[in-house]
Image (cartoon, rainbow, N blue to C red):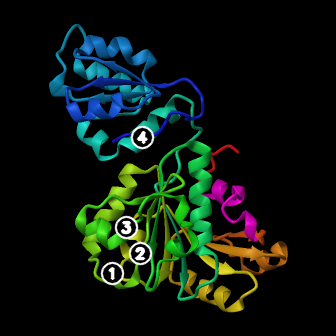
Amino acid sequence: MLLDWRRLWRRPATTVVAATAHPAVLAVLWQQPDLRVREARTTAGINALLGEAQLVILDPDAVSEMQIAPAYVQTVLAQAQIPHTDSAGFLAEPVRWLAEGAAYAGQLHSLPPRLVAFTSLASGGVGKTTLTIGLALSVARRTRLPVAILELTHGASGFLTVLDGEGFSTPPADAYTIATQSVAPGRWRGLTVVPMDGRQGALLTNEAHATLLAQLRASHALTVVDAVQPHPLWPAVAAAADAIFVVAAAERPDTVANAQALLGEQDARRVLLMLNLASRLDRLASRLAQSDRPVIALPRRPAIARFSDRLPALTAAIWPGIRF
């Protein structure tokens, strides 16, 4: 797996201590041009490198005890809060662990959420697709981390309608094909894009969709979902999402009523109302706000700024540690 970290923040490279003989782990690490990889085969070797380590990949069976007890190494890792895992854990989520190391090295102030979803209740035209793509681009461009977008729809793909064909570096495959035929997702301006055709999406089982979602989360720092409700594949998204934005268009009372109805079915604090295309922010937001569930209002923006707007208010809401 080759991750493009060449321009990652232009800060000192992350030092990874690899106390493992697993060839797949070493292959991933050595393909990252902005990593410093230090291999260790003894407990003394690990201990000597801990002062410069921002990530440790440790397989106890691959390390010989020499002068330092294995329990001491584990204690130091825990007390120093150095991110550490074994080969299986690293290979399951390589992007996430490399981001953990980058955060420990000071290259990130915090880590982004794993999964964010924009949804609405059986109403189109509220801006879910635009917000999905805009947020994904904002995080990807700011951090150079890999970001994916996925949609749940009953009809034609909104992604393929909105995204220009010239922006795809590889042809886009739909979610059903990706999940059932091991086809790689398409890439658009650096984003991993998983569109859904409603007819083929209806053939996806909940298990296959949950597996696809888990794969995206494992290989991307952030996955953003554009979903209409009700949808049979929604439960897997709802179970995994760190934040869910129920989207309404400020000038369409029907979408506001639908959003409030959908919010009434949710009791989790991670579910928020997103008021899009607002013009009278203070009055409308205060009317809709609840004491335990604030409203995030986004002002109307020129059409030309759809995918160039950094969406700072939205991005900061899902990732307080990001810096613009």
Q: Is residue 19 above or below residue 313?
A: above
Q: Mark 4 points at which residue?
A: 3
First in sequence: mark 4 vs mark 1:
4
Amino acid type, mark 4 = Leu
Residue 304 locus on image (x, y percent):
74, 66
Amino acid type, mark 1 = Gln
Q: Label 1 neighbourhood size at 10 Å, few (<14), some (14-19), many (20+)?
A: some
Q: Mark 2 points at which residue?
A: 196
Task: Give the alpha-carbon distance from disc 2 to disc 3, as whole Å.
Answer: 9 Å
Residue 31 locus on image (x, y percent):
36, 31
Q: Is residue 241 above or below residue 9?
A: below
Mark whose residue sits in front, 2 or 3: 3
Task: Give the alpha-carbon distance from disc 3 to disc 4, as whole Å.
Answer: 21 Å
Task: Indicate the quadrant containing the N terminus: top left, top right, bottom left or bottom right.
Answer: top left
First in sequence: mark 3 vs mark 4:
4
Cβ atoms under marks 2 and 3 closer than 8 Å: no
Tell me the SS state at disc 1.
helix
Task: Give the alpha-carbon distance from disc 2 to disc 1, as whole Å.
Answer: 7 Å
Q: Give the range drawn in magenta.
A: 303-318
Residue sitting farthest toward the bottom: 254
Cβ atoms under marks 2 and 1 closer than 8 Å: yes
Amino acid type, mark 2 = Met
Residue 118 locus on image (x, y percent):
55, 71
Is 51 magenta? The answer is no
Residue in the foreground of this view, choosing between 132 and 86: 132
Q: Mark 1 points at which residue?
A: 200
Residue in the foreground of this view, choosing between 265 and 284: 284
Which of the 4 image quarters holds residue 203?
A: bottom left
Q: Mark 3 points at which residue?
A: 173
Which of the 4 image quarters holds residue 257?
A: bottom right
First in sequence: mark 2 vs mark 3:
3
**Which residue is located at x 45 percent, y 86 percent?**
155
